[in-house]
Structures are given as C-alpha cells and as structure tokens.
Image (cartoon, rainbow, N blue to C red):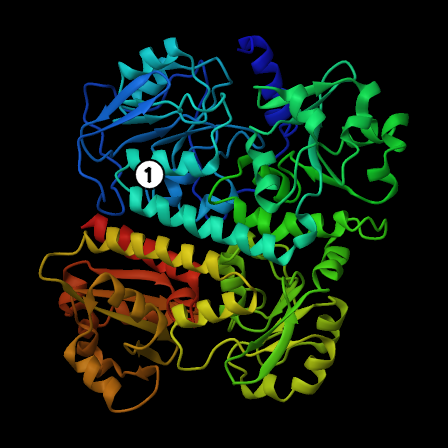
C-alpha cells in the first residue's frame, strides 16, 4: 500500500496541482455557493434545530432499507436519502446526474468558490450546495456534522478506515469497494453504487448504458484508435513526471476508446493508480499519442526538456496539451472528472484531438480547425426534416445554428456551435443560455443571417432549423459553405426536434440520456402537484395587451408533462384556429383565470403595460391573482420555440413556484 504522504503528494500533483487555483468557468445560472473551509465555522442551523431536507426529484426505484458492501464493511441506508453530502472529489456528478441535489460538495480544483462544473450546473436548482473546502486528509468533522446529512458518499474520497468510522457516527457513509485502489474506482462502478445508495439503481444503469454505447460508437468511428499506444502525463517535483496507470480513471477513458498503455509503463505503475519516472526517462512516454495535463505555466518547462524534444510523438505532432487549470477549455477538467456528466465533453472536445494526433501528421495538432479537418474525413448520409438526403461529417465540430432550438440543443448535447443567430427579439444570442453560449459568435438575426459571418467561421455543418422562408431563400449560398440540414418541422415538439438535431450531430446517446434526466425531473415536480391536479395558463404581456399561449406551445407542453391541464375555454379557443397564440382584450382577462398563471414579457414596453394592467380592477378580481398564484417568468424562455435547456429552466420555475405554496 502506498504511504499516505506519497498518495497526498500524487493527488496534489497529478490531480489537483495540475489544475492550480485560477478561476474556473463559472457554472451557468448556478447560484452562489457557500464555502466551508477546514477551519471555518459552518453557517448552518445548530444540530438541535430541524433542517429542511433537500427534496428528492424522483421516487426511489429501490426498496429501503438497503445494505451496501465496501472496503470497510457494510453500510445500511434506512430510507431514501434527503440530505446527501458528496464527500468524494467527483461524487457530485453522478449524484446530480441521478436527480438528487447534495447539500454539500467537496472542492477539488479550479475556482474554490465553485465546486460544480459547467457540465453539471444545470442540475443545481434552488439553494446551491455548500462547498466543503477540505484538502485530502483534512476533513472538518464538525462542519460535516453540522450539515446534518443522512448519507455521506465518499466513493472518490480516499478516506481511511478511521475517517470512515468517524463519519459513520454522523450518518451512513459509503466508501469505495476494495476491488480497486484508492481513487481508482471506474466511473461505471461509481455511478452504479451511488445509484444503489440513492435508491436509483435502474436510473444509474441507464446512464451507464448510454455512455458505454457512446464509447462503442466512437470505437467504431475511429478504428485507428484500436491498439494505438497512449499515455497521460503531468509534471511532478524535482524534474520527475507522473503518468496515469491502468487503474486511473482518465487512462481507462483512453482504454475504452481502444488505446493501450505500454507494458513498461503499466509495470512501473503496478498496483497504484499512477506511476513516476525521472526526466531522463521521458522516452518511456514516446507513445502514439501523448497527453499532458498541465497549466500554461508548466508547459514551457516541459517543452524545454531536451529528451522531450527528441520524442517521436513531439516530432510527428502526436502531443495533446490539456489545460486543467480551470481557466481554459473544459476538455482537461472533464477528463480529470471522467464522470457520466463530464464524459460528453470529453467525447465532443478531446476525441477529435485524439483523431488529429494519432494520424502522425505534424500539421494536425488538435486545434479547433485541424480537429474539424480530421473529423471531416469521415461522413454519414442522413435524411433531414424536409426529406432531403444530406451528406454530413461523421462528427461535426464547427457547427453554425440558424435557430434558437438548434443552438439550445447542441449545447445540451455537449457541443458548442461556432456561430448562431440571435434570440428572437434580442440584440444578441438568447440571454437565458448565459455563459454556455459565451464562445458562440452571432451571425445575425433569424430572418437575416450574415453569409459573410458564416463563411468566416468555416463551419463543417449548418443546422437550419425548420427552414423558414428567409433561410430557404439562402439555401444555394449556404450549401456552398457547408452541408445544410433542416433539423425539424414547424409542427414538431421540442423533444422530437431535439432528437432530430442529435441525429444530425451523431449524438443520439447523449440525447437519450438527457431526456431520461428530464423525465426524472418531471416526476419530481409532478409530486408537488395536488393529487387532483391543477389548471394553468401561460401568457405573454405585450404593449397592446395579453397574448395567451395555446396548449401546443413549448412551455404548455412542459406543463402538460408535469400534469397541469389547460382551462376548457383555452382548449376550445385553440381548436378554433391553428395559431400558437391568441391576443386577448382586457375585457377577456377572465380567460386567463386558472389555478396558476405563468406570465412573461419580452421587452420593457410589455413590462410597463403589465404594471399598468395590474392596477386594473379586472385583473385584480381574477381568482389566480387573489390566490397569489401569478408567477412572473422570463418571456423569452417561456414563450419561445423552446429547447432542452429552456425546458429545464421552465421546470425549475414551476418547481420553485409550487414549493412556495
């Protein structure tokens, strides 16, 4: 067994120090998190006061009590956990993926004010988890106890038996299996055992299956990976270097893609999850693909090593640099986490770089443009929403999205388009997407996209939405730039469109996993409804007055998924015409009356008109107003064409409203 001090040093150098402490990309729309440092007094209620449990979003799929075996014995969990602490460095990802929000998560690396990375930020709703800023070997037991957990998950924590015994006095504690070295539990096992502990074993198995299917697809698409050697290295101290062993999760990712670790490196690592070599033996890293996890400051020092400069991998352009500082691209941090939530980032951003590196051509070094060139060598033929046959890249990398739904869906699938049209009625990209779209270049409006801007982005695929007349008129010019795919029909709901977009992007498994998570969220919110259900209306207040959204609109479908019904008068109104909306006069305000009214505006003029209307006696007399069940929402989201990320925001708004009652 490795000495604990050596294990601590390896963790700091190979896992955390390579990430440094620069600011990480802040999770989009995630609330500020409370940090609990090792010596801080936690700002939580005293143990004598009751603490409200975190609601479980879905019903447990396993009968409690249940008992789980691990390296320190057995842990019995008496009932479905409500206050879960993610004590393992990466355990929050499978917990969140399974629809449970932990009350606290442990800081790993990057920005120490954020412990939930962008790929998981959408799973955080309401009050954000507290941050346990507790370095390896320095647990703050008092802070953990003050959070009053009913389950402590420490699968990726590397806790000792003494620490386990202490934690178990606070709450049932889940340690890792003894079948693996510390910090060597595979992502599949991590997801499954956490799913079992949360009573969501079936959901966990579905996540694992979807991710393994994606690995299989990538192996089929990249036969050149099979049997190619690959190593992942990081700088250590005194001129030495760490590398990932066969039991290290990030090396397992490469193995799952078809790569192999050279036998000599495997022998050096032995039973540890990492190995160490001196600077004089950098030749051992001369593999078909060599990946470095390092900060921008460390890279020049490595590149200055004379032995490094002589490596065939260097001369032939087979080196990939992954910035794990948290301040750069997400591929490095995503590989470090190697979880069911971060792996889609690895698939989207790292696999094209691996393809570019393994070909041995120094001109393909894994940048965005060269990765797209390599990925573009393989193509697929698909039939788009208009019935046209289109030949598209097997794994498109530089996508331009000409509708909000295309942009929303691509981001939800882990692919950031290089360009997109503005949000409807907005001067830029859809505001609700926040930082997720910060790297996307605007190419104009939906009705007037700029051909010059699109050409400059050198796309390999153009997603054209429902092919509105303005876009259809530009088809000859757009098709000369890149393949153009009509991704959905005007009558399609957002789920059908999302699935079609995923097909065009070759990300069907990711779409299936997302929709499964959406269904879990829906089940959770549905549990907040009265047993006899409830009616709801959705309206957009314009300067001219209210516009009621019909049952076929995006947000209305989300409400229907939860179990809301629409008032009979609105259903009849919808049946009298095919429009998605219907304007109402102030004298028709009674049509908006229902158990709930979700009301949004699109511009300052509409907001001003709404404020004026609120003073109108006809508005004040509505039962929904008197019951304080008028919920103001973002009209740009609720009354838009929608998308998977928009659907999650709508779900969050509904959940928050129901919880306030």
Q: In the displayed structure, does residue 659 sit left or right of residue 230?
A: left
Residue sticking out furthest to the left: 532
Quadrant hosting residue 458: bottom right
- Give the class, few, some or many, for how many residues have Cα within 10 Å of label 1's Cα (few <14, many ≥20): many
Residue 5 lies, in percent from the top left, at: 57, 9
Considering depth in this image, is 570 or 333 the residue closer to the camera?
A: 333
Q: Is residue 312 above or below residue 572?
A: above
What residue is drawn where x is 14% and y is 62%?
A: 626
Q: Is residue 433 above or below residue 114?
A: below
Which residue is denoted by mark 1 in the rendering?
195
What residue is drawn where x is 27% and y is 22%?
A: 75
Residue 480 lies, in percent from the top left, at: 74, 80
- Secondary structure category for the residue under label 1: helix
Considering depth in this image, is 245 or 601 the residue closer to the camera?
A: 245
Q: In the displayed structure, does residue 282 sit left or right of residue 429?
A: right
Q: Is any atom of residue 638 visible in this view? A: yes
Quadrant hosting residue 188: top left
Q: In the displayed structure, does residue 418 sit left or right of residue 123?
A: right
Q: Is any atom of residue 125 visible in this view? A: no
What residue is drawn where x is 33% and y is 68%?
A: 555
Number of marks in picture: 1
Q: In the displayed structure, does residue 331 sit left or right of residue 635?
A: right
Considering depth in this image, is 183 or 18 the residue closer to the camera?
A: 183
What residue is drawn where x is 28% and y is 42%?
A: 200
Q: Is residue 552 above or below residue 528?
A: below
Considering depth in this image, is 179 or 79 the residue closer to the camera?
A: 179
Quadrant hosting residue 375: bottom right
Residue 183 lies, in percent from the top left, at: 50, 25
Residue 43 lies, in percent from the top left, at: 35, 23
């Amino acid at each position: 067994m490795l000495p604990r001090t050596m294990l601590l040093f390896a963790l700091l150098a190979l896992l955390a120090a390579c990430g440094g402490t620069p600011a990480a990309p802040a999770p989009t729309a995630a609330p500020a998190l409370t940090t609990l440092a090792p010596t801080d007094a936690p700002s939580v209620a005293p143990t004598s006061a009751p603490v409200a449990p975190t609601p479980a979003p879905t019903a447990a799929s396993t009968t409690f009590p249940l008992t789980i075996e691990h390296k320190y014995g057995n842990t019995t969990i008496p009932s479905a956990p409500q206050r879960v602490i993610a004590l393992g460095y990466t355990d929050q990802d499978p917990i969140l993926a399974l629809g449970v929000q932990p009350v606290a998560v442990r800081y790993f690396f990057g920005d120490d004010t954020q412990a939930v990375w962008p790929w998981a930020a959408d799973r955080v709703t309401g009050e954000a988890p507290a941050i346990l800023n507790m370095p390896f070997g320095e647990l703050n037991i008092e802070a953990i106890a003050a959070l009053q957990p009913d389950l402590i998950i420490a699968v990726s924590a590397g806790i000792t038996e003494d620490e386990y015994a202490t934690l178990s006095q606070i709450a049932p504690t889940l340690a890792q299996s003894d079948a693996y070295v510390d910090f060597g539990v595979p992502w599949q096992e991590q997801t499954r055992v956490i799913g079992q502990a949360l009573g969501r074993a079936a959901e966990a198995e579905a996540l694992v299956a979807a991710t393994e299917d994606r690995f299989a697809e990538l192996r089929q698409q990249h036969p050149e990976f099979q049997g190619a050697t690959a190593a992942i290295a990081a700088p250590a101290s005194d001129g030495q270097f760490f590398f990932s062993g066969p039991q290290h999760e990030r090396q397992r990712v490469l193995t799952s893609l078809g790569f192999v670790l050279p036998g000599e490196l495997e022998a050096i690592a032995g039973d540890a999850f990492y190995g160490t070599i001196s600077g004089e033996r950098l030749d051992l890293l001369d593999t078909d693909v060599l990946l470095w996890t390092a900060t921008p400051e460390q890279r020049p020092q490595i590149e200055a090593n004379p032995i490094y400069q002589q490596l065939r991998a260097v001369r032939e352009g087979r080196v990939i640099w992954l910035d794990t500082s948290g301040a750069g691209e997400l591929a490095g941090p995503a590989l470090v986490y190697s979880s069911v939530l971060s792996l889609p980032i690895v698939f989207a951003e790292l696999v094209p770089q691996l393809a570019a590196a393994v070909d041995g051509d120094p001109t393909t070094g894994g940048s965005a443009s060269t990765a797209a060139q390599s990925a573009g060598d393989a193509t697929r033929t698909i039939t788009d929403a208009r019935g046209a046959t289109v030949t598209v890249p097997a794994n498109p990398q530089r996508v331009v999205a000409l509708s909000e739904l295309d942009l929303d869906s691509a981001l939800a699938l882990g692919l950031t388009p290089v360009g997109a049209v503005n949000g409807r009625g907005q001067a830029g990209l859809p505001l609700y997407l926040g930082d997720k779209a910060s790297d996307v270049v605007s190419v104009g409006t939906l009705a007037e996209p700029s051909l010059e801007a699109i050409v400059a982005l050198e796309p390999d695929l153009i997603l054209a939405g429902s092919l509105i007349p303005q876009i259809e008129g530009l088809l000859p010019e757009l098709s000369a730039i890149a393949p153009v795919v009509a991704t959905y029909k005007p009558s399609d709901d957002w789920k059908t469109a999302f699935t079609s977009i995923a097909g065009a992007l070759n990300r069907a498994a990711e779409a299936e996993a997302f929709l499964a998570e959406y269904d879990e969220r829906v089940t959770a919110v549905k549990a907040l409804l009265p047993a006899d259900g409830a009616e709801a209306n959705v309206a957009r207040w314009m300067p001219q007055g209210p516009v009621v959204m019909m049952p076929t609109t995006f947000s209305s479908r989300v409400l229907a998924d939860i179990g809301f019904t629409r008032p009979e008068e609105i259903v009849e109104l919808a049946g009298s015409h095919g429009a998605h909306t219907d304007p109402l006069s102030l004298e028709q305000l009674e049509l908006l009356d229902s158990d709930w009214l979700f009301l949004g505006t699109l511009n300052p003029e509409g907001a001003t008109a709404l404020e004026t209307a609120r003073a109108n006696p006809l508005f004040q007399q509505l039962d929904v107003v008197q019951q304080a069940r008028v919920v103001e929402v973002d009209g740009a989201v609720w009354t838009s064409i929608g998308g998977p990320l928009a659907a999650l925001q709508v779900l969050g708004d509904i959940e928050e409203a129901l919880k306030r009652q």
